[in-house]
Amino acid sequence: MNTANLQLEGLVMAMALMHQLLVSKGLVGTDEVDRVLAMAEETALGDYRVAEDLTPANRDAIVFPVRLLRLANNMAGGREVPPFSELARMVGETKQPYNDQR
């Protein structure tokens, strides 16, 4: 596996746990975190090069970290965040096709 992928995996999990900490301290709510992450996903997918120049698989790659963080945020609810492999599997199971794939 590419070392950069492993580094990104660690970074995404660290961010998921930071979100959980902020929520547990009452500094933000899970709904606020989800709203910000949804905006990040929309912004990434709204970029003209993403919509026009990239394959659906590459678009999925761009938004994968955001989708994983949203899933972790919405699942946490005061308990441990699931491992990366479980979250990654669930991201794949819940993704929807893009408009140009129908």
Image (cartoon, helix red, strand yellow):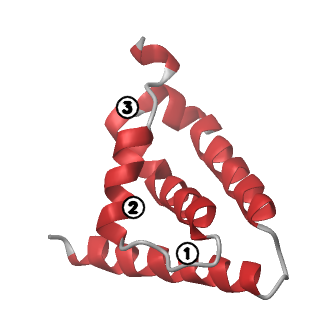
To which quarter of the image does residue 45 belong? top right
The residue labelled by disc 2 is: 87
Is the Cβ of the residue at disc 2 closer than 8 Å to that at disc 1?
Answer: yes
**Residue 82 — which label?**
none
Disc 2 and disc 3: Cα gap in Å? 20 Å
Residue 26, x across and y down, in percent: 84, 82
Q: Amino acid at mark 2?
A: Leu
Q: Amino acid at mark 1?
A: Ala
The secondary element bearing badge 3 is classed as helix
Residue placed most toward the observer, 10 or 62 = 10
**Residue 16 — which label?**
1
**Residue 56 — which label?**
3
Residue 38, x across and y down, in percent: 68, 49
Q: Mark 3 or mark 1, which has the lower sequence index? A: 1
Residue at (44% x, 53% y) in the render = 64
Residue at (45% x, 50% y) in the render = 62
